[in-house]
């Protein structure tokens, strides 16, 4: 009888470090995260968003997407640091023919930040940058149509929508978690 329970116990013990990490959100600036792609995050944030948007938002997104792993591949076929689907990448590449391979971290990051910019533009200009970015990240994760529906529902309830939190309750659970994790990574840890 003990032998049957041991594999489960060993599996749980093996998962303990992962589960512990999942409950403690490190800052995007924590030395745990590689700085290998920081140049690309800086460069393409400045290129697509200008100098007033903190590039660390997109690094945080990369951390949530893949843990900054350029070899990452999802069950649905999303690839690279930013977990872009090949079909989405091909769409982005039509407007950005200079992009090379989806597997190259530089181009993967560039394409994702470009796509984030497209999503960002869909949200009203009067919103604070951080809130508009959260809506863009939600759109990246769940699809623009899904978040537009959530936004419309929030607006019908509250009237004017000024913050992501108003929309979050109408968004898919996975997307709420995704945006929350990105925002947590942006919080300084002491």
Image (cartoon, rainbow, N blue to C red):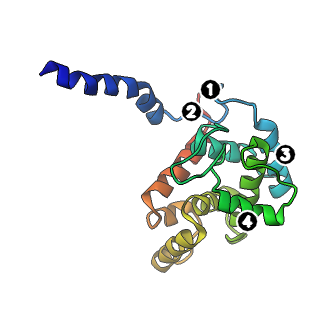
Q: Which of marks 2 and 4 is in front?
A: 4
Quadrant position of residue 68: top right
- Residues marked 2 and 1 touching at CB (< 8 Å): yes
According to the image, label 4 marks what residue?
Answer: 91
Instruction: Answer few, some or many: residues within 10 Å of disc 2's Cα (few below 14, many 20 plus, some between 14 and 19).
Output: some
Quadrant position of residue 126: bottom right
Screen quadrant of the C terminus: top right
Residue at 52% x, 51% y is: 178
Cα–Cα span, label 1 and label 3: 22 Å
According to the image, label 2 marks what residue?
Answer: 26
According to the image, label 1 marks what residue?
Answer: 32
Eyeballing the image, is 12 above or below 96? above
Which of pointers 2 and 3 lies earlier in the amino acid sequence? 2
Helix, strand or loop for disc 2: loop
Instruction: Answer few, some or many: residues within 10 Å of disc 4's Cα (few below 14, many 20 plus, some between 14 and 19).
Output: few
Eyeballing the image, is 84 above or below 149? above
According to the image, label 3 marks what residue?
Answer: 43
Give the percent coordinates (x, y) of residue 82: 66, 48
Depth check, front residue: 153 or 60? 60
Q: Nearer the viewer, mark 2 or mark 1?
A: 1
- Residues marked 4 and 3 touching at CB (< 8 Å): no
């Amino acid at each position: 009888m003990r032998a049957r329970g041991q594999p489960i116990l060993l599996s749980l013990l093996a998962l303990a470090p992962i589960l512990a990490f999942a409950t403690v959100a490190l800052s995007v600036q924590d030395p745990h995260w590689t700085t290998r792609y920081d140049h690309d995050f800086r460069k393409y944030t400045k290129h697509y968003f200008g100098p007033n948007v903190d590039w660390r938002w997109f690094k945080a997104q990369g951390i949530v997407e893949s843990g900054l792993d350029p070899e990452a591949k999802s069950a649905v076929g999303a690839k690279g640091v930013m977990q872009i689907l090949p079909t989405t990448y091909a769409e982005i590449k039509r407007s950005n023919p200079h992009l090379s391979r989806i597997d190259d971290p530089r181009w993967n990051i560039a394409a994702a930040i470009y796509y984030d910019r497209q999503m960002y533009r869909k949200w009203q200009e009067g919103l604070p940058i951080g809130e508009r970015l959260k809506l863009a990240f939600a759109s990246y994760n769940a699809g623009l149509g899904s978040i537009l529906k959530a936004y419309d529902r929030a607006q019908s309830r509250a009237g004017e929508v000024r913050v992501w939190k108003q929309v979050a309750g109408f968004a898919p659970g996975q997307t709420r978690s995704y945006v929350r994790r990105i925002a947590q990574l942006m919080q300084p840890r002491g």
